[in-house]
Image (cartoon, rainbow, N blue to C red):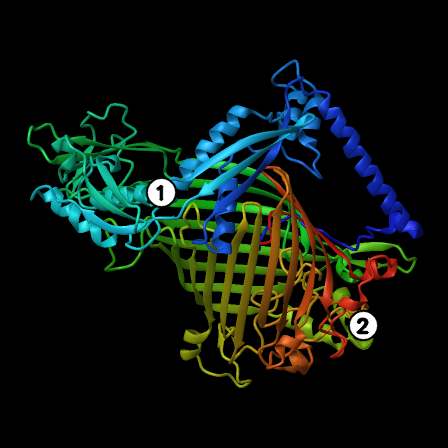
Amino acid sequence: MRKAYLLHTQTDIFSFFGKKLKGYVIYFISCLLGFFVLSSCSVNKYIQSGESLYTGAKIKTNIDSSLNKSQKKALDEQLKTIIRPIPNSMIFGFPYKVWFYYVVGKPKKEKSPRAWFRKRFGEVPVLASKRAVNINTEIISNYLNNEGYFRSTATGELVVKGKKAEAIYVANVKPRYSIGKVEFIKKDTSAFSKSLIQTKDNSLLKVGEPYRFDNIKLERDRIDKALKLNGYYYFRPDFLIIKADSNQNARQVNLYLELKPNITQTSLKQYTIKDVLVYIDTPDSTTNTGVQIRRGLKVFDPKRAYNNRVFNDAIGFRSGRLYNSQTHDASLSRLINLRNFKFVKNRFEMVNRSDSALINVVYDLTSLKNKSLQAEANFLTRSNNLAGTQLGVNWLNRNIFKGAEILKIGINTGFDFQLASKNLNNTLNSYYRLAADADLTFPRFLLPFYSVRAGRNQALPKTNINLGYVRLVQKGVGINPDSSTYRYNQYTITSLRSSLSYTLRKNASVEHNFTPLSINLIKPQNISEEFTEKIFRSAGAGNVQDLLRYDQILITRLILGGQYNIVYTPVQTPKSKHYFYLNAGVDIAGNIAGLFTKKQSDDSKRIANTVFEQYTRFDVETRYYLDLSPSIRLANRAILGYGLPYGNSKNLPTQVKQYFVGGSNSIRAFRARSIGPGNYNILGDSTAIFTTAYGDVKLELNSELRIKVSQIINLAAFIDAGNIWLAKYNESSGYPESSVFGKNFYKQLAVGGGLGLRLDFTYVKLRLDLATPFCKPWLPEGERWVIQDIKPFDKAWRKQNLILNIAVDYPF
């Protein structure tokens, strides 16, 4: 459950305009423009005589017909990004941060409120300079030549108007050259020359592609990495030179890669590992105190705090093997991810022999404190529209069994309350929580016949054993005969869970999580007579669904199963405009238990006289981000969840495994748990007690255009769609047959959209999203799309349709 500060309110944001809205808007805009004009003048008075405020640059490119329109546009955009300096932030041409910088004034002390405000919200004025224009013309010319537009030139001038100045550049772009031939020059028959030639197969320099100097630098880095995978520890990319021979008539460049002359033999040798030395909390790495040797690994551990297996698994280097940079990186990453060491330092020492091609690997480790105690107090909100407080204490024990294991025991208590619900019963409800958790993590798989592969995975596999307990007391509000109110405990739900799970991170992109055993016992207790009477009164008033739905909540549930989950996040290159994320998993419960238990007289299967759940649930979430420009990003998300109950289960376990949509991180035009299932309107009867919608199937689609206005201010326009459904119909759910997922599911999608304001305060991102429904799936077909009914100046419409979401961080 995601933590986020969120608030759903029906905000009447236009009421202050009144009946004369149009006149007020015109008056407001006039005042705003007048303010900018006067403020601009007030900025000008601070600019010294002979100086001008730099407002930006324009570039005109003269290009021959070899480039099409899209290529020309891309080149123009790229040239704009390399021009410096960057002008001050402006709104409608007004340098508001410069104005604030001058208004605040120069602080007397460097560390004072005035200095903080000036630095945080102001900007030093960027003044125009002819020298900067001359430098930029050289930069543009060099960039074009480095991109293969040989013999291109650039000119620039400064256009001054009053106290402001703009730079104008003209780039004369010549035809682009492509790669004609690529050769790796072999000067001798040495082992190094052979290794160098072998790297050519994966060359980044392709015949026929445009010449780019950046690709030449990347090619040298690629060769360096390939050689370091094969023992060449002391080799460097700048030992290589690539000579270019251009043919002006053919507009081609032939490239010849060779080794620089006079490179020392030390840099051209393949190095083999002699010893792997690990020093733990020893200031003098020459000591022999506490030395332990295992499989060529020497551990100097005076306190005998760690088993040697920890370092044998974490460090991939082995005596007698060639140096490998992948093993180097993986070993450092593993040692850091053990979370047992404050500092991890690594160095390589050449063995002192004249003809030596041997190196020692040395690690200096400084341990963290084994035990720590931490107290925390939080105000938090959840994606299910609950907010509250939480007080907790966590105790941490590192290296509890001398194998770098981590034991964490936590106890927390808190109080939750319902945020902004149309239903009075839900608004008055509150929840008291008491929870305890114990997590024991091993930096290895607790499996027979499994060993860590020396240099492959970036992180060690993990085994996690978890035990948790939660006690939830739901409190309600009763009404006395004299109309006064009182609070009472409606019911208590306790949850006891335990799991065994394994985590394997193969590389920086892929992580696998496998939980072969998961047990969760959920048991209701202390159901008050007053609450029972309340439910039956509601059912007697026609809300039979209340009785059916609470019957699903207030029963003992036993969930025996397992899960598998994979997270895929491709590594992005610095210049990449595309970002992708995938999280997929399967959750299976009751299948194995069902094989070994017999049916009872009521056709159910039980363990310890408790009916266990049987279902299969699939979940997929994908995210795709596209940078349209340096300041504009298109963010997209798709979520699909499908649960199939069978055997003992008619639905997925309510409120535990079922889905819901709506809220500040979901479909923002609707409140959390207020949509569906299908075309059912959970809020249709305001007298009902149970007004939260859950389902077995979930589909959600989100798209958001994010615009960076300034360092702090960001804007967004978004659209969300989705719904939940039942996987199959059953009367006990309390929902009609139209709530079942079917071929017409797309006609039952709730759709909403709106505008957002995000304030980035570096450590905290405050988000305000104002949304309204576009399509309400519970309305009759033909009337569900309500875009034509949007009336932003109508108070009644705003009260019923505008949702203001206040949250921290982005929704996805």
Residue at x 16%, y 31% (from the top left corner):
263
Residue at x 70%, y 38% (from the top left corner):
91
Residue at x 53%, y 72% (from the top left corner):
642
Residue 311 visible to the viewer: no
Residue 781 visible to the viewer: yes
Q: As displayed, is residue 191 above or below residue 720? A: above
Q: Residue furthest front?
A: 249
Amino acid at pointer 1: Asp
Amino acid at pointer 2: Arg
Could you say where residue 550 lies in the image, as x and y percent from the top left? Answer: 68, 70
Q: Residues within 10 Å of mark 1 (few under 14, many from 20)?
A: few
Q: Give left or right: position of 345 versus 83.
A: left
Could you say where residue 386 lies in the image, as x and y percent from the top left? Answer: 68, 54
How many numbered tags mark residues here? 2
Pointer 1 residue: 214
In front: 687, or 319? 319
Q: Quadrant of residue 224?
A: top left
In front: 245, or 35? 245
Q: Which structural element holds mark 1?
A: helix
Residue 526's disc is none
**Quadrant of image for the C terminus:** bottom right
In front: 443, or 203? 203
Q: Give left or right: position of 158 versus 530.
A: left
CB contact under 8 Å: marks 2 and 1: no
Q: Earlier in the sequence, mark 2 or mark 1?
A: 1
Q: Quadrant of residue 534?
A: bottom right
- Mark nearest the camera among 2 and 1 is 1
Residue 537's disc is 2
Q: CA distance from mark 2 to mark 1?
A: 75 Å
Q: Quadrant of residue 391?
A: top right
In front: 413, or 750? 750
**Quadrant of image for the N terminus:** bottom right
